[in-house]
Structures are given as structure tokens and as C-alpha cells.
Image (cartoon, grey):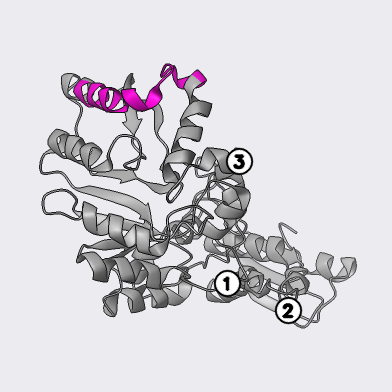
Amino acid sequence: MAESEGEQGGGNGGGGRFSLFLRELKRSLGLGPDPNAELSEDLAEALEERREAQLPFEPQERRMLMNIIRFGELKVDDVMVPRADIIAIEAATPLPEVIEAVREAIGEGILTLRLSGDEMLEGGLSAADCIAIARHLSAPGRLDALNVLGGNAVSEVGIARNIPGMGTPTAPFLKMAAGIRAATGMPVFHATRITDVETARHAIANGMIDMVSMTRGHIADPDIVAKLQDGAVDRIRPCVGARYCLDGAVYGGGIACIHNPATGREKTIPQRIAPTDGPKRRVVVVGGGPAGLEAARVSALRGHRVQLFEAAEKLGGQVLVAARAQGRAELGEVTGWLSREVHAAGVAVELGAFAEPAAIAALGADIV
């Protein structure tokens, strides 16, 4: 959303951006001519309605990033009930007031606050500002933990920086989160491009943060924890930072993953492939690109006897070409992981083998 210098306000600019956003929301939310004056009342009303409906207060997270307030609905037991996700700073409803109201509502429940460690925005909250705010909000009895990330999401550029993709450093805001943990003494959660277990272990073992949120990692492979427990770290399907999942999240269409076709389609494509109860087939796959590799992997896991032919001397197909572009090397792990998995599943792989029609027919395959 564009904002002019005159609308940014003075000081660190947070109040100006917040007021601008509220003006844009006013029509759809029906907050009236002076939305700032109604925030505390609306919060109290939303919390009271939850109490009257006897709704459970689950672990709550209040978000300060982007300095906005959103109102929506929550479906509980097929009943639509009002809900307020408070995303505010002291320029509107004072955030301590919001925290205290939510704390009163949830009692001993877990309450965390997500905030940026540096908005990286002209006129926005600097790293020093964010540390000062975090210290102020970390008074005993208020919060149980902080959830720290970097950047902002008020523009396309801000989103790209806030949720970086391939070609950018791993864990770019880890030191930022560690700085807030050191300044406040609070438990800190952190999520930004921590795509592998080794980096997560390093962050926790060295006391930089207390919990890693591998959001995109779990979009790529929801079985990360199960594979860790089984000692199969090398079997984890890695997030390659393609940001394909972001397209659905930001622009609509649902969450998907560039190299996990089951993600977002679990009703029709299972994440875990079970052996077939039917007859075992002989399957021949022609081509060792991502489609051929996935077909071979799934067929083998279903219990079929699979043979794959690839004309080149290396599996990967056109992904190998795409991965040679500047900043795109991580794409190679799409077919790198699939290549390892087809071997683990027992697929017979023939490299440098042209699949001539007569030769394929002579194999007597049930499925090609």
C-alpha cells in the first residue's frame, strides 16, 4: 500500500502508517470516523464474546508486524464467532493494554508476541527501536515468549525481504533474533529461511534462540520431526526457497510446493505413500526429470517393480539447466532429493539409455 511522506507522521513513523491503514480498513470494518478511539472497546467486546460463548483460550500470539489490526471470524463447532487478531503498537491502542487484556482473558495460557527485530523501512522501527520495545514489553507477567522476525510486509519489496527466497543467505535474521533474546532474557522463537536441521540445531545449541519455526520447511516436508525421530535426516525433502508457496498465500489459490505435489492436495494425493493392496506391476519410466523421478518414486513405494531410462548421464532433466542460473543453485535439490529417493526405493536406473520403442516393448511392462 503506497503512503506519502505526509501520511507517515513524525518520530519513527509507526503511528502514521497505522492510521493510514485504519483509514483504508474503515469502510470494510465499519469502525466509524475515529477508529483509533474504538480499538480498546472493540478488543474488550471481542474477548467478552469469547468468554460468554465459553470458547477455549488456546495459546495466543499477538502480532505487531505491519502495525495493523484485523477483524475476522473464527469457526468453532460450526458456529461463527467474532474474533480479533490484534496487531498494534502504542500509537493506537497501547500494546501493553492489549497484552494485559489478552492475558486476563486466557489466564495461565501461553501468550507470545510476534514482532520485527528491524522493520528495514524508511521511517519505520529500527533495530534499536525494536529492542527497546521488546524490553518494555518483557515485564514479568506479560508475555511468555517473543516471536522475532525481520523486515516488514507493507510492500512487495518488504515481503521479499521478510520472506527471502533462493539465492539469499540461510537464516539471515538469526543474529537479530539472538540480539533481542540477549536484551530481554525472554524465550525467543524465530522463523526466516532456516531450511535445514543443522542450522536449526546450531541456533538452539548456541543459545541464540529457543525454538525454530521451519514454516516453509514443513510445507516441503511435513514429516521433518518424524524423520528426525527415526534418524533419517538425510531423507528430509528440503525447502529450496522457490517461494512458490508464497504465491498461493499472498495472491490466493492455496498453499503448494514446487517439489512436493502432495502439499495442499492431501485429500487426493497422500504425503505418505502406502503399498498397494492390488497386484504388483512392472513399470517403465522414460525420462529422469522431476516428473519421471516422482513417478518412479511413487510407483516403487507402492510396491511395483520400476525401471527408469534417462538419455543423459545424470538424472535431473531441465532442472539441471535451471539450477545453473545465478542464484538458482538450490533448484538442483528438487531432483537431487528425488534422485536419492528413487535409489532408496529400489528403482533400477539406466543412464545414457535412449528408450527406443522396440526396446521398451520388449521389456513387457504393464505400465509405461
The residue that mark 2 highlights is 350
Q: Does the magenta stretch include residue 30?
A: yes
- Residue 4 disc label: 3
Which residue lies at the image location 40% right of the left edge and 78% below the top edge?
198
Residue depicted at x 77% and y 67% = 287
Callout 1, which amino acid? Trp
Nearer the observer: mark 1 or 2; the answer is 1
Nearest to N terminus: mark 1 or mark 3: 3
Question: Can residue 158 be seen here?
Answer: yes
Mark on residue 337?
1
Q: What element carries label 2?
A: strand
**Residue 293 sits in which quadrant?**
bottom right
State the image coordinates of residue 230 (x, y, percent, origin top left). Answer: 33, 71
Q: Distance between the residues labelled 1 and 3?
A: 47 Å
Residue at position x 69%, y 64% from top?
290
Determine whether label 2 and label 3 are within 8 Å by CB. Answer: no
Q: What residue type is labelled 3?
A: Ser
Query: How far apart in space, not on screen, are marks 2 and 3 (Cα)?
Result: 61 Å
Asked if one can make out residue 274 in the rendered structure from this viewpoint, the answer is no
Name the front one of labels 2 and 3. 3
Looking at the image, residue 279 sits to the left or right of residue 186; the answer is right
